[in-house]
Amino acid sequence: MDPLELIKLARQGDPDAFYNLLSEHKIQMYKIAYSYFKNEQDALEAIQETTYRAFNNLHKLKQQQYFKTWLLRILINYCIDENKRKNKFTVLDDTANVDQNEAMNNKIDLSQAISKLNSKYQSIIILKYFEDLTINDIAFIMEKPVGTIKTWLNKALNELRIILGEEELDHAMQGRKKTIRIKSEL
Amino acid sequence: MQCKEEKKLSELRANYDDISIPNNIDEFIIRGIKKYPKSKSIGLILRPFSIAAVMALFLLISMIRISPVFAEYLGDVPILKYIVKLVHYDKGLKSAVENNFIQNIGISDEHENIKLTVDNIIIDQARMIVFYTIENNSSYKYLDLSTIKFADMTGKNLEAAYSYSSYFDNDDQHTIQDNIKVSFVENSVIPDTIHFELELQHNDRPDSMTAVKLPYLWQVDIPIDKSKFENLKEIYDINQTVEVENQKINFKKAVIYPTRIEIQVEFPEENSKKILRFDNLRILNEKGEALTTITNDVNASMPDENHVNLYFESSFFTLPQKLYLHGSSIRALDKDKLELVVDTEKKQLLKAPDSNIILNNITQTAEGTAISFLLNTDEVLDDKFSYFIFTSRLTDINGVEFVSTRASSSGASNPAFKQEIIVTIPKNSQYTDPLRLTIEDYPARIEEDFKVRIK
């Protein structure tokens, strides 16, 4: 069925219509949530909560053609809030554990660097580089002007560079070969 | 420099694309959808005019979560184990089970490899809790209750309200153990045998909304040992009047049954305000332990406009030395403000209790004319509470009565208001503006501490 038709039915409270609507986006939702939490359980909970919030607030969606971006906005807001809440209580992973595995390549370092960014920069990186969304869509999701998103994107990339630079320094002090490799690639 | 980061990010992209997708995502989507409430209020009030309709009154409540610590308790008595789990949230029922105030039944009925067994009941003059097991050896994947009936042996329905949970989202669909709570209308005669009828529905996925009813009737005749509960009640005369902001509240009597405490309250006619609800009334014993309002079942009844009977967890088996009733906040509204008048043609609110409610819009939907109101509620006291505000009956200028449907949702399009309430007048109703809606609950409060000794 046409998505707009499904939205219309879902707005009238039809659970099947809403289920079909969400099925279209579930993989994308899962991957985004997984990138925030790095574990299956939290990512699935994010999907459950996003489904609930979206169904509950569907009547507020003004432009129905933006359903997908609107849905991702709800998801990302949840992920950011949840991460904030969790960070109050949990100690971030000890990077040493990861480093022990020499087989892991520098992709890990970059992915860790991303998780060290603040949540809005993190979101922008995920949406832009992993989800291939346009700046316009990202602006809609994050409820900010396009110009702001562009600025943030630049800042996010800059920060990534700084974080990676610092890590190189850390690694260098501990005499790890791996870091030298990263350095040469950057 | 920057393009290098971008390049690395696109390499990392391969990792992202390889994130493995668990095959149970759908379950979580369905759980999210099911969490969306059709009705959010859990408490239910029995009104005199609804008694005739009470047989058809069902409360679907959310799954009860069980504390693992308590589940360990009485762990070596297998039959009691799940019962303890099911009542742990109610201190009165919990001590009833611990004191063996329970009748063993063990009667089954089976159709197409689906076996219903009524294992035990807790019953007194006020309530009955039926503990049952459904063993599903059929090919139906997900089962749920469809219709429930309790009657005497002549087939006459019991005067009672029923509440029960849906278990479509139970992890174990092979053996389901749950309970149905039956709240008797006051002074109803309990028969020696209660005839219980159940219909089930099934679905291929955990969703009751598109479920299909099975063509069988599971029936169990439950023998009731009335000697176990006859005369089991304590009655305390309270006869104390509390006065808050010139409004009098007479606490008349407390009746303590094994399954609940009933507090009889009277509001004198001369009060200028109508007392709508008590926000946080609770009963404390001499140690300061609190008994709270009954949850997941009927929590009050209203014999008439000026009387209400409130139901609390029972102290019957814990034998407290003293009991006090404590409260600090009451929802009340001036008696001349108990209505809301709206002109649907001009889309105007002609009368409202205060500025906490506004007319949002009036639209024509498939069901009829939908009048949407926005309501401002208390951040703390009304957190997670959905107001319906109006009774289901409304009248037009000529006094013609209509039955409307009401829906309430948290969150409203206007950020200044926290809830939206939609009253829908059925399609093809002939009415003349303005319409008059009766208010039965409202977020207007008297906040003042009071304490009354019961025992």
Image: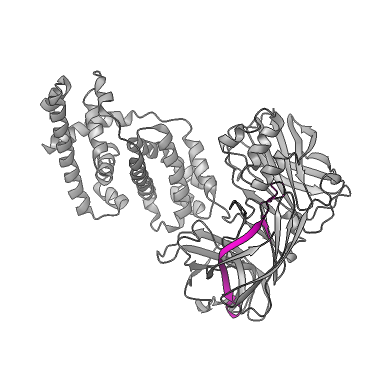
Against B79, residue B242 (above or below) is below
Nearest to the observer: residue A15 or residue B374: B374
* Image location (x, y in percent) of residue B345: 53, 77
Against B220, residue B367 (above or below) is below
| Residue B184 visible in image | yes
How is this picture coloured? one colour
Q: Please give left or right for residue A77 compared with residue B215 in the image.
A: left
* Image location (x, y in percent) of residue A80: 33, 45
Q: Please give left or right for residue B339 compared with residue A83 in the image.
A: right
Task: Count the labels in the image.
Answer: 0
Quarter of the image that includes the N terminus of chain B: top left
* Quarter location, residue A125: top left
* Image location (x, y in percent) of residue B421: 53, 64
- The residue lying furthest to the top in this view is A103
* Quarter location, residue A75: top left
Q: Which residues are magenta?
A: B310-338
Please give the name of the residue rendered at 72% of the width and 37% of the height, measured from the top-left corner. Answer: B132
Nearest to the observer: residue A9 or residue A34: A34
Q: Is residue B226 located in the magenta-colored stretch of the structure?
A: no
* Image location (x, y in percent) of residue B224: 84, 43
- The residue lying furthest to the right in this view is B154
Quarter of the image that includes the C terminus of chain B: bottom right
| Residue B213 visible in image | no
